[in-house]
Amino acid sequence: MNHENQDLKWYEKLSHKIEDKMQFFIWVFIAALIGGLIEIPPFFLMGEVKGPVSITPYNALELAGRDVYQAEGCFYCHTQMIRPFKWETDRWDRNREYGPEPYSKAYEYVYEHPFLWGSKRTGPDLWHENSLNNNASWHKQHLINPQETTPGSIMPKYPHLFEEPIDIEQIKANMRALQKIGVPYTEDDIAKADELLKGKTKGDALVAYLLKLGRDTKQK
Ligand code: HEC
């Protein structure tokens, strides 16, 4: 291209110059390459993310409940991340249990595979559910018929979950897979799965999972 004869502003000339002959493409490629390289080291530091309290991995029953949470798509309506805004921390730390910075922090998610942050709050955030309501029988009743515990609720009913058994071997296999990617499950934890899951339904597991949310991250 030849723009020399045109009456162009200096920045237009500059723009034409760098867009000529693949130059722009090459510079963008180099910039993206540098950006990509900078992102690599933090990836290996994930295990080093530490906070003021220690997080324990989900036990077999809670982990089974987490599977149900994903399979039922609870994350379509619920988030699991409290943002650093006063109106959020006031609402989800009303018992003042999560220290001076009561919003979600990176270390809290160290054993989350995959993250279940969600993006839409048709229902409330659940990341501190243990603090807000740790009554297991309320949760069971709410899942069976939300309109009964919470008149006017638009949450769907999940009574079938309290009739469906858990595939224990699948949960043990999941624990082994998580072990490989850094969740510190011991052989003992995996062996205990039989005992923890015996006779339990998917609904029981889901309630156990809900009660684990926000339990370890309390600071008092
Ligand atoms: C269609 C959207 C929708 C889906 C799907 C949904 N919920 Fe809800 N959920 C709500 C709404 C709205 C509320 C608030 C009213 C109420 O408490 O029932 C709520 C409330 C809750 C609460 C009470 C939270 C609190 O602190 O008051 C829990 C716990 C909960 N949901 C868990 C679940 C689980 C577990 C699933 C998946 C099995 C699920 N929800 C699926 C919409 C939904």
Image (tube, rainbow, N blue to C red):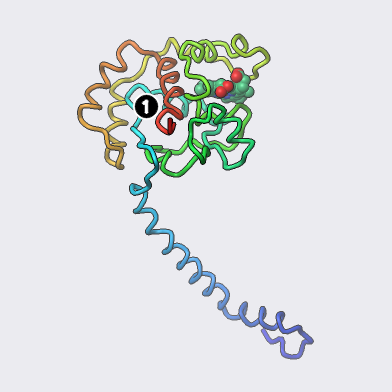
Residue 155 seen in the current view: no
The vertical placement of 34 against 193, above or below, is below
- Picture quadrant where residue 164 is located: top left
Depth check: give the residue in front, 44 or 135.
135
Which residue is painted at 40% across and 19% down in the image? 205
Left or right, residue 69 beside residue 123: left
Residue 38 seen in the current view: yes
Depth check: give the residue in front, 195 or 97.
97
Q: Secondary structure at mark 1?
A: helix
Left or right, residue 148 beside residue 42: right
- Picture quadrant where residue 93 is located: top right
The vertical placement of 30 against 194, above or below, is below
Which residue is painted at 49% across and 30% down in the image? 97
Q: Position of residue 197 (x, y in %)?
A: 31, 17
Residue farthest right in this picture: 7
**Mark 1 residue's CB less than 8 Å from ligand 1:** no
Q: Amino acid at mark 1?
A: Leu
Count of all numbered marks drawn on residues in the image: 1
Left or right, residue 110 beside residue 77: left
Which residue is painted at 35% across and 53% down in the image? 45
* Quarter of the picture holding the N terminus: bottom right
Q: Position of residue 194 (x, y in %)?
A: 26, 18
Report the residue marked by disc 1. 63
* Quarter of the picture holding the C terminus: top left
Q: Mark 1 packing: few (<14 Cα in 10 Å), some, or many (20+)?
A: many
Left or right, residue 92 beside residue 137: right
Depth check: give the residue in front, 173 or 58.
58
Residue farthest bottom in this picture: 5
Which residue is painted at 39% across and 59% down in the image? 40
Q: Position of residue 42 (x, y in %)?
A: 39, 55
Q: Quadrant of ligand 1?
A: top right
